[in-house]
Amino acid sequence: MGDVALRAEGLGKQYRIGGRQKYKALRDTLTDAIYFPVKMARSMFTASDDKSRAQASLWALKDVSFEIGLGEVVGVIGRNGAGKSTLLKILSRITEPTEGFVDIHGRVGSLLEVGTGFHPELTGRENIYLNGSIIGMKRREIHRKFDEIVAFAEIEPFLDSPVKYYSSGMYMRLAFAVAAHLEPEIVLLDEVLAVGDAVFQKKCVGRMSEIAREGRTVLFVSHNMATVRSLCDRCVLFEKGRFVFSGSPDECIQRYLSQCDELGQPSVAFPAPSKRRLWMRSATIMCNGAPSTNFFMGDSITIVVDFASEVPIRQPRVAFVLKTQDGISVLNSSSRYQSSLQYDVPVCDGTIHCDLGMVPLAAGNYVLTLYFGDQGEDTHVVEQVLSFEVAERDIWGQGQVPPPKVSCLWWPTTYQFVTTSGSNRLSHAS
């Protein structure tokens, strides 16, 4: 066991469906911690209706077993809802498993989804010290790293404000800085690049590379296959809550992409979230006016987003990033920069059509990430929500197709052959 950092055996997590967790202040959290042993003792003597529990429950993870060696950088991939985030919450000791166990050898630092890991009532400064204490660091150790964390996060003016007032981007910057700089032996990262601008994402990738070179154990959940391939020594694949494959990044990514091809649909519906004030209800990709996941080079692409809002809104914002299957960004767009685009009167629901027109995509498979919110921030982000395939076509009508694998785009370009007077004389001379 000396060379094993993490070991899971028969791990499972069951959630009850239909309940909504109420907001808890810090005093509520402390009270729950005090009375937790009493609740556990009572539950041992309380009969339960197994049948009704089975009807109103969902296994987010089931029968998961694996080992992660010391110093390994392991990518965790799979479709939305495969159980990746649940696994990291269990490893972070945020969520208790329903069955099975985990052996953890070393201090754990984690950066999970926005809203996890920090207490909203505490300030950024207080949460830095709290997180360091949770993973077993002494106050002087945290103090030594404090300035470095604040500089990386770039939130110094807001450091003494409660984090519940932070935007999602500010929260993520601070959370990543804490996870990456408090020197845990084991680092758990969940969708680090899902929130934040390009500069922040570049800093994240650079810091993750440093962590990997330092020999620390890293579990990295991501939909960005290019980053997974470049950072990870090994990959594991999850499907419907189960661990289905472990191998090299290339092997694992190929299995994942094959899985996506089998399950691709032109439209996807989103469940009503418990905490978002503005969210997407569904998204559809359309080819020449009809829902489809199969395109030819030169076809017209439209993305349709249905949304809802708790309060009337005049100017929702939608943005998207189109990537190749292995995570290479091809193009992006946002309605933010069209300030005149708005509803005549505020609405609580609506539909937005994003007409890309004839996009010059080369033949291949592509995935779409959607960002939705208001003019202030993204409130709903879904990675790789839709996928589609572009097939070859004789776009010039001359019996030819663009050569494959040269680039992601073929660009309709106007060429002019201009003859100089000198060339004319030389040509005539020949």
Image: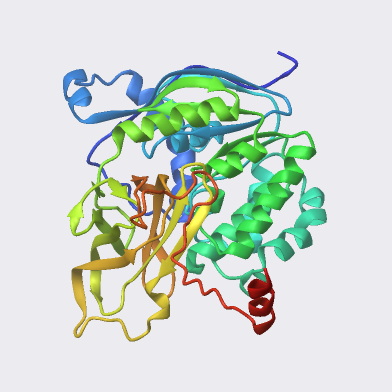
Q: Give coordinates of residue 336: x percent, y percent.
A: 41, 76
Q: Nearer the viewer, residue 356 or 188?
A: 356
Residue shown at 31%/66% (left/top)? 357
- Asked if residue 255 is positioned above or below residue 190 in the image, the reply reads above
Residue at 64 percent across and 42 percent down: it is 134
Image quarter (top left, top right, bottom left or bottom right) of the C terminus = bottom right
> Does the image show residue 183?
no
Q: Is residue 198 left or right of residue 390?
A: right
Q: Nearer the viewer, residue 423 or 108?
A: 423
User: Where is residue 251 shown, x and y percent of the image?
Assistant: 54, 25
Q: Is 258 situated left or right of 236 in this image?
A: left
Question: Which quarter of the picture shows residue 92?
Answer: top right
* Residue at position x 30%, y 81% in the image: 341
Query: Residue 259: x percent and y percent?
Result: 38, 30
Comparing 261 with 64, the one in front is: 261
Q: Which of these two is toward me, 235 or 10?
A: 235
Question: Which quarter of the figure is the N terminus placed in?
Answer: top right
Question: What percent of the width, then of the height, locates residue 121?
Answer: 50, 61
Q: Is residue 221 visible?
A: yes
